[in-house]
Amino acid sequence: MRMSIGLSLPAALLAGLVSCAVIAQTAPPGSAEAPSTGPAQTEDISKRHRQTAAELVDGGIKYLLSKRDADGGWSLGGGVAKPAVTAMVLKVLVQQPGYDTKHPAVSKGFNVLLGYRQKNGGIYNPKEGRENYTTAVALMALAAARDQKFQSVVNDAIKYLKGLQIIPGSESPDGEAIKEDDPRVGGVSYGQHGRPDLSNVGMWLEALHEAGVSGDDPHIQRALVFVTKSQNRSESNPQPWAKIGTNDGGFVYAPAVRGSAGTGESKAADPGAVGLRSYGSMTYTGFKSMLYAAVGRKDGRVQAALRWIQRYWRLDSNPNMPAVRSQQGLYYYYHVFAKALRAWGEPVISDAKGSKHNWREELIDALKARVKKDGSWEGDRRWYEADPILSTCYAVLALQEALRK
């Protein structure tokens, strides 16, 4: 059965959702790959930073609990994006001690979330679309709960997400079969139809990774091909834009807008520039995606991305976005920053000038400086980060990553 894809869809409601812990089919608790069930006592940060982070997490959770909808779920107001936002908040909760699936708020929240489960294994609101995004973040929350009663739901969601991947033979908008060398191969879009992009692929890949799918799984390896074609690196990326651009090792939003005959896309577009501009949130997404796909640390693609991270190190903005848009996607950036660097496994990163940065402590300081009195965070209007529920989820999830070993 061939899958039909379109050229584009309206912008997603959520941008690059979050990572999760795993349940029975993954590594055992206590192993290097096993999730923590709350803020772990890591020696990589000072006692003062650990205490600050814990206080910020507690404040964020208190705020999120105060914003429940009447049915026990969460949304962006008026029920908008309810399954996705409910899943994000549930993941925040179940990663904290005292909030297992027996907790009343958690139990009720999962009842709301599972009310969106579809016969095909996906978890989404058919009226809203975004089947990939919503199912992936739902899978993350279900896996993070570490409750065996969700295992069949997790298995079905994994199967559904794999089925959304564009493969050779998928049907293009013009009715022709997608060929092996098409830059869209390996990608996924917001739903079953549409233009694939790195934000979608990064979220999709992370959900599968955190649900226990091995990095050498054929679906993940096919996604790696798409990730590679999203990197500003002409040595490994055959796309025309990669050969005329900055070749800086960073990542862009999409390797192709209109298939093999088109150009890529960057959300950090610089009018008049040659090639596409790499930027922080996508570079950290690409970096962690390669690590999840079992690419070696010394691989040229990984090292090029690391050099980009070192060159553009900063936590006051989304790196290398145009100055007037530097705050766009900031909280999503904080989350993928934390997730990627924990996957990298080094507590200290040296920037391009040789200065050393304890990434956990700097992230905690950055989030402390931006927290509001009610325990929430609020970002730029773009990508819905002006909604404090969404930005608070990103912030708390980033802090939880920083507190893990």
Image (tube, helix red, strand yellow):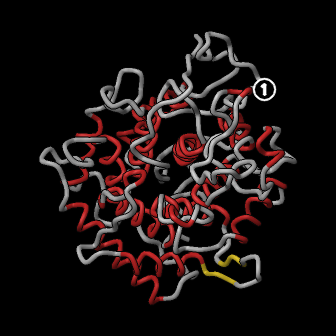
Q: Is residue 182 left or right of residue 398?
A: right
Where residue 88 sits in the image (x, y, percent)? 36, 51
Q: Nearer the viewer, residue 165 or 151?
A: 165
Instruction: Look at 35% across and 32% down and name the residue there.
Output: 124
Residue on which the image places disc 1: 181
Residue type at the position of mark 1 = Asp
Where residue 36 sits in the image (x, y, percent)? 47, 63
Mark 1 Cα-neighbour bin, 10 Å: few <14, some 14–19, many ≥20: few
Where residue 202 sits in the image (x, y, percent)? 58, 46
- The image quadrant that residue 197 belongs to is top right
Q: Secondary structure at mark 1?
A: loop
Instruction: Look at 29% across and 40% down and name the residue there.
Output: 113
- The image quadrant that residue 372 belongs to is bottom left
Above-or-below relation of 48 to 275: below
Where residue 207 sits in the image (x, y, percent)? 52, 44
Above-or-below relation of 131 to 95: above
Task: Kindly give the residue lying farthest to the front in the view shown.
Answer: 272
Instruction: Look at 42% across and 53% down and name the residue there.
Output: 382
Q: Is residue 374 left or right of residue 140?
A: left
Instruction: Look at 67% across and 64% down and name the residue there.
Output: 344
In the picture, which quadrant includes the C terminus?
bottom right
